[in-house]
Image: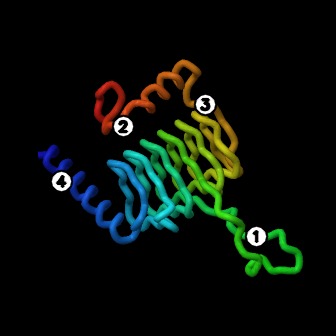
Amino acid sequence: MNSLIDRLRELFKFARGRVLLQTCYRGAKVGKGFHVAWDVVIHGPDRFEAGDYVYLGPCVEVAPLVRIGNYTSLSSYVVITGNDHRFDVPGTPIRFSGRPESVVTCIGHDVLIGHGAVIMRGVTIGNGAIVGAGAVVTRDVPPYAVVAGVPAKILRYRFDAAEIARHEDMLRQPTRYGGALGRPY
């Protein structure tokens, strides 16, 4: 019985996602298994790209020109924003100073971004990184770093060099649903 309920739930999520991509997020480029929760805002969806099995949690807000790698999860209330107002024009209020040229924000494969984190536009978050809940990311995050705080600072790394190599080998394989070595999530 649970298997049937799980299948129906997955089918509903898939259908809901397809409807949203054809209506609210028209032009977004997403891979298989893309899931978007409720109240997600994607600004400039025609300039949004997400890989396979990407999850955007409830109330996420994404600025234009964002690229997200495979297996990445953004928890609820994550915001990718900022760096989009000119403030360096003497004699002109910020409100009327215009906007600089847009910049790309890149989030790698297998990244986890915690609840309420703020990611400033234009940063790159490397593969396998973890951003702690409530962190404010103002600079690039190296691959496999665990960062937290305001502004976000490196606390440690997820894996040692051998484990990173093994994980990178997995990320180079074709994407698939499920855990490592065939174990389901």
Give the mark toward the camera: 4 or 1: 1
Give the mark toward the camera: 2 or 3: 2
Measured in 3D between alpha carbons, the distance from the residue under mark 2 to the one under mark 3, in whole angstroms, is: 24 Å
Q: Which mark is residue 8?
A: 4
Q: Residue at x 68, y 66 (%)?
A: 84
The amino acid sitting under disc 4 is Leu
98 above or below 57?
below
The amino acid sitting under disc 2 is Thr
- The residue carrying mark 2 is 175
- Looking at the image, which is closer to me, 75 or 20? 20
Count of marks overlaid on the render: 4
Q: Residue at x 64, y 37 (%)?
A: 142
- The residue carrying mark 3 is 157
Measured in 3D between alpha carbons, the distance from the residue under mark 4 to the one under mark 1, in whole angstroms, is: 48 Å
Image side of residue 31 versus residue 76, left or right: left
Q: Residue at x 72, y 75 (%)?
A: 98
Report if the CB atoms under discs 1 and 3 are less than 8 Å apart.
no
Which quarter of the figure has residue 117? bottom right
Which quarter of the figure has residue 11? bottom left
Give the mark toward the camera: 4 or 2: 2
Q: Residues within 10 Å of mark 1 (few under 14, many from 20)?
A: some
Report if the CB atoms under discs 1 and 2 are less than 8 Å apart.
no
Label 3 SS? strand
Badge 1 or badge 3: first in the primary sequence: 1
Badge 4 or badge 1: first in the primary sequence: 4
- The residue carrying mark 1 is 86
